Amino acid sequence: MSNNQTNEPAAPTAGLVALYAIAAGAVVANLYYAQPLVGLIAPSLHLPKSIASLLVTFTQLGYATGLLLLVPLGDLIENRALSTRLIAGAVIALAFAAAAWTWPIFLAAALLIGLCSSTVQILVPMIATLTPDKTRGRVVGNVMGGLVFGILLARPVASLIAYTIGWRAVFALSAAGMAILFLVLRRKLPRVVPKSRERYGALILSMFKLYATEPTLRRRAAYQCAAFGVFSLYWTAVPIYLTEQFHYTQFGIAVFALVGAAGAISAPLAGRLADAGYGRIGSAVSLALVLASFGISALGADLHSVVLLALAGVALDFGVQANNVLGQRAIYALAPELRARLNGAYMAAFFGGGALGSALASALLIHGGWPLVALVGAAAPAAALGYFTLNELRRRTRPQPAT
């Protein structure tokens, strides 16, 4: 049958998929530039060490707010226009971060950076809408691969720039990059007009109701909330730990973070596993990897081994990114007309966990060192695995569609 007969969209071109992947990676990177720079920005702006990780937390809180309040607009407003307007807002926010002269101003800019960077979660369901069901997992996985590279390369790139010309240049250069991206996307993105005619207030309320009506969303949000929470905990804590215990410079932190970028290969692989019907097995393995990574990191701290700490980072990144793609593939299959809201609800829980993880990082290091970081980091994926196991036991007694 033709695509018109089946009411499925034609497959997007490889060039369009690549553009979405590049855009997703460039936008999401804005959320992570501050992570390896806490040790530079905090003293520069006279932010107390005990709350220094708020530099990361405020960006993630802004992102979670955008997911709750702005991403659902993807079901109401033409998607290209909405996305490019938010990217324009990111340009302004990044410029303010680069010029911030006190820590309250930087935190306000960080909140706005996170808010505007939520556009990435309009772009991902947008490409899913443009893709036929049989290849959706692969295409979303490829775009998520770009997003993951943005996440993982943001840390080493930020560290290298800060090492060379200072931390303010990181945000100034990103502002320039977002301005260029704004112009390209306005010209190249297709128009995607949503069919929903709901009012905004009803739209937001309906998103919260999805947690009650969609068990797949509840499960997937819980798994990824735990996984991403400890991801943020690790990557906020480890640059501080490397500086204090191994006397690393920003260049050394950049090299360490670059090793973690190896975990990006998991996103396309996970998409193919999901298309092949192995989503449940993939989820179990992903969560187990996240749990194991903190055991490896504890051993690395005990043996004073940077190699083991880096291996832990790779395992953690691999598990978290794979679990995310598997989760998005599952929720995108639920209701095409609700994709923006489903994605917003899922990602808000996801980054709520991230904000909590990054907020805890400084305090855990001060009060218990890396052993306490590793203990807390292992507890969350262990709980998620327990929840996963209980759900699988219920499925055996009451068969349900695969998620």
Image (tube, rainbow, N blue to C red):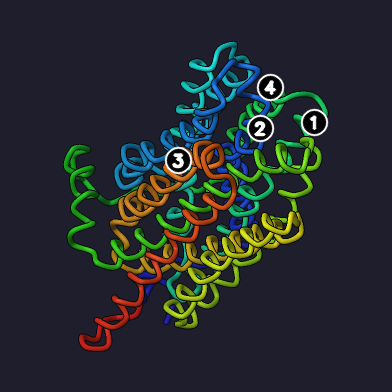
Badge 2: few (under 14), some or many (20 or more) residues near its Cα, within 10 Å?
many
Considering the image in quadrants, where does the C terminus appear?
Answer: bottom left
The residue closer to the viewer here, 325 or 56, is 56
Real-space Cα separation, disc 1 to disc 3, in angstroms: 28 Å
Alpha-carbon neighbours of circle 3 within 10 Å: few (<14), some, or many (≥20)?
many
| Residue identified by numbered label 4 | 168
| Quadrant in the rendering for residue 43 | top right
Q: What residue sits right under mark 1 in the picture? A: 163
Give coordinates of residue 371: x percent, y percent: 56, 53
Work out whether mark 2 precedes mark 3 in sequence or the reverse, and give the earlier one: 2
Q: Quadrant of the N terminus?
A: bottom left
Real-space Cα separation, disc 1 to disc 2, in angstroms: 10 Å
Residue in view at x 40 percent, y 55 percent: 225
Circle on res. 37 = 2
* Residue 160 image point, x, y percent: 78, 36
Residue plotted at (65% across, 17% down) = 44
SS at mark 2 in the image: helix
Residue at mark 4 to residue at mark 2: CA–CA distance: 10 Å
